[in-house]
Amino acid sequence: MKYTLEDQIVLITGGSQGLGKEFAKKYYNEAENTKIIIVSRSEAKLLDTCNEIRLKAHLRKETIDEGQVQHKLAAPLDVEQRLFYYPCDLSFYESVECLFDVLRDLDLLPTQTLCCAGGSVPKLFRGLSGHELNQGMDINYKTTLNVAHQIALAEQTREHHLIIFSSVTALYPFIGYSQYAPAKAAIKSLVAILRHELTNFRISCVYPGNFESEGFTLEQETKPQITKLIEGPSDAIPCAQACDIIANSLARGNDDVFTDLVGWMIMGMDLGLTIKKSRFVVLQWVFGVLSNILVVPFYMLGCSWYIRKWFRENDGKKAN
Ligand SMILES: NC(=O)C1=CN([C@@H]2O[C@H](COP(=O)(O)OP(=O)(O)OC[C@H]3O[C@@H](n4cnc5c(N)ncnc54)[C@H](OP(=O)(O)O)[C@@H]3O)[C@@H](O)[C@H]2O)C=CC1
Ligand SMILES: CCCCCCCCCCCCCCCC(=O)[C@@H](N)CO
């Protein structure tokens, strides 16, 4: 199943900002016959994003008499529209069922689904609240799980391209990401199983390195210094650049997608019982085998020594 922007119905979760918004822009500006539905919790952000994308494309639609804006996903559908939004907290299964009931009623079941919704609160484990801990699983795992399940039920035979967003931290979890990395690792595990079961689906999993977004800016505020040091080799790239890298990689047929060299390296080191479909995969595998023997043991020893030193110097109990 080739990845193309044109002639699609694409559902983008987390489309109100960051990477999801960049993908909505890309589909809107680079394809003429593709309908885009962006979903997130905040109707205000979704509305702003729709208007901004239209304004930039000089196609801003004025509000209609009833006070409804033309691009909220509702009946009757304005078939002239290409960009819609639907506010929904995707961590609640029942809300996702309602979303898919609306899509089905409007004959807008997607041909591509991008599960971009996610976000992290990087803190030391003891510094997290119960709410933050549970939000981690809700926002990063349950939003993807619920949408993937509903699209799997909706599309029993037709081809569908499911594009799920994990993180390099799923392949290399480290200090400061306890609220986030386990959820992203769960996504990696789910992808491997769905690739066995959903035989009419193409399932791609993206493992981005750092990129600049509203979420990234926010997480920098709580991120422990040791976490910033460890992830230092993954410089944050512009969000639009990350979007282009991912789209080009998908178009080349890759299904395990990285956004930087560090991500390629770490994916190579993650051997395990899954066949990677990534760029330069043979070279990546050879690199992974050799580095697991020659580099990783020394890196991990050095890393744990450095973390212990950091705690000693920062009196770990209070350090954040
Ligand atoms: N930025 C980075 O450095 C990296 C990001 N990633 C991953 O890439 C994806 C995109 O990242 P980024 O652009 O930074 O994300 P942002 O944090 O900028 O945006 C997250 C989006 O998810 C939406 N969202 C959050 N919770 C829910 C929910 N319960 N239901 C529906 N929508 C929700 C938010 O909208 P609203 O608040 O309106 O709900 C927002 O649109 C995420 O999965 C992230 O984990 C991976 C590696 C690195
Ligand atoms: C031989 C061993 C070499 C190891 C090099 C180690 C480099 C680690 C880079 C980790 C980058 C993590 C980026 C994803 C962060 C993320 O998902 C958050 N920004 C959430 O938004």
Image (cartoon, rainbow, N blue to C red):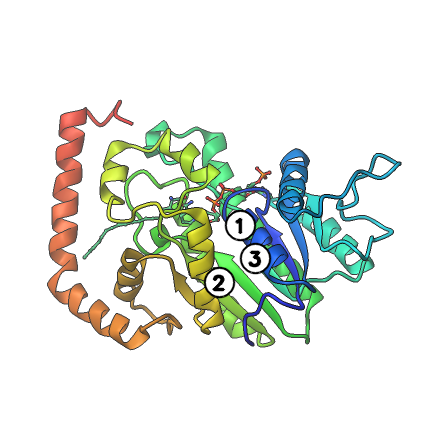
> Left of 185 or right of it: where is 36?
right
Q: Position of residue 319 (x, y in %)?
A: 25, 25
Q: What is the secondary structure assignment of the residue under circle 1?
A: helix
Question: First in sequence: mark 2 or mark 3?
Answer: 3
Q: What is the crowding at mark 3: few (fewer than 14 residues within 10 Å), some, or many (at least 20)?
A: many
Measure the alpha-carbon separation of dots 2 and 1: 11 Å
Q: Indicate whether 287 appears above or below 14.
A: below
- Residue 320: image quadrant is top left
Quarter containing the N terminus: bottom right
**Residue located beneath label 3 in the image:** 114
Above or below residue 76? Residue 157 is below
Residue ID at (14%, 40%): 306
* Upstream in sequence: badge 1 or badge 3: 1
Does label 1 point to a residue whose CB lies under 8 Å from ligand 1? yes
Mark 2 or mark 1, earlier in chain: 1
Q: Are marks 1 and 3 in contact (CB under 8 Å)?
A: no
Question: In the rendered image, which residue does mark 2 sit on?
Answer: 247
* Residue at the image position 55 percent from the left and 54 percent from the top: 23
Who is closer to the viewer here, 244 or 132?
Answer: 244
Q: Residue at x 49, y 70 (%)?
A: 251
Position of 75 with respect to 252 (left or right) is right
Residue that badge 1 annotates: 22
